[in-house]
Image (cartoon, rainbow, N blue to C red):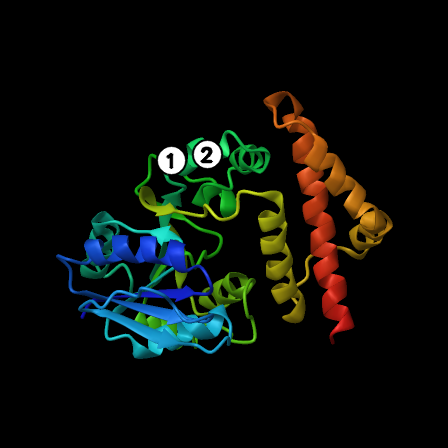
Amino acid sequence: MLISIVIPTKNRNEILLESLDDAIKSIENFDAEIIVVNDGAALKEFPSCKNVTLLENHQRGVSAARNNGAKAAKGTVLYFIDDDMCITPESLKIIQNLYEQKMLEQSCFNLNWVYPAKLQETLKVKKIGRYILHSSYHTLEGRMHTKINPALQINEAGGVASCSFCISVVNFEKINGYNEKILFQGEDIDIALRLQRNNIATKIITKITCFHNQKDRLEIDEYLDRIYRGYTSQSFADMIDMSAIKQHLLSILLPFFPVIKFVYDKTPNLPFFDKLNFRLIGLLSSITYLKAIKETKRNT
């Protein structure tokens, strides 16, 4: 077995099944397996398919889920993807080439992605959608805050994004896998630092071969809930990067969160109001981050 695709999932049954269908089709002509690690409620309609394994993670968090999948893997190369990431046969061909060219010995790779074209069209008619497009959060480039040079086949990366992350088993074991104290968000920051300390370069494959199907986060409440859960995870792991001054200023605005949210909800869904809406979303996001910090302090 060459490639082990590890997919952690939690309570996103419909989206998982779409991603899994693409993954099953993608491995047809490859020496590969798929390992789904469930961290939430029981999965429905899970396919019975050769080279597809289901493991239970018992709500131990995404880092433990990925480690759990890696321990069960039979492959030489681990390919971690999120449960909303749709891969293609070309994704696996690239990984196979990286292995054959021995590029995985001293490096690990993110395979480039964008939102599917249909989802991008949906974003254009929603307030939060146009914010995502404006911020380039619908691309790996925007999400990692890095500039990808399309003239190069491979770009250097300043970090790691586990939603589409390829690493050899040898190097994954060398860095002792993911930090299981980090339950949901922040694990990429931690693992990138340990890769750096072990002289394992982080790089990006320039060509887009994956499609991030985050279609369940297109309303403001879903968007803010994702931010809250993510920063709560980082707060519990002592990975806060918000300055004390900013926390103080946001604390003044915290009581007005419902008012700001009300203004956003009532602002017309028209491009003319995008500049205002983008500012409101940014403010709501920052206050939500502060809420996560305060919630963590109350529970520790």
Say what secondary structure mark 1 lies in.
Answer: helix
Around disc 2, counting alpha carbons within 10 Å, would you say few (fewer than 14), some (14 to 19), or many (20 or more)? few
Total residue callouts: 2
Where does label 2 land, which residue?
Answer: 122
Q: In the rendering, which numbered label is found on residue 47?
A: none
Image quarter where the N terminus lies is bottom left
Is residue 24 rendered to the left or right of residue 8? left
Where residue 194 sits in the image (x, y, percent)? 49, 69
Query: What is the CA distance from the residue labelled 2 to the residue labelled 1?
Result: 6 Å
Disc 1 marks which amino acid?
Lys
Is residue 259 rendered to the left or right of residue 101? right
Disc 2 marks which amino acid?
Thr
Residues tagged 2 and 1 counted as in contact (Cβ below 8 A) = yes
What residue is drawn where x is 54% and y is 38%? 132
Residue 241: name its quadrant. Answer: bottom right
Residue 185 visible in the current orientation: yes
Where does label 1 land, which residue?
Answer: 118
Where residue 150 sits in the image (x, y, percent)? 36, 35
Residue 83 visible in the current orientation: no
Is residue 67 rendered to the left or right of residue 169? right
Residue found at the very far right of the displayed protein: 252
What residue is drawn where x is 45% and y is 56%? 161
Say what secondary structure mark 2 lies in.
Answer: helix
Where residue 69 sits in the image (x, y, percent)? 35, 73
What residue is drawn where x is 71% and y is 45%? 284
What residue is drawn where x is 58% and y is 38%? 128
Where residue 236 sits in the image (x, y, percent)? 66, 70
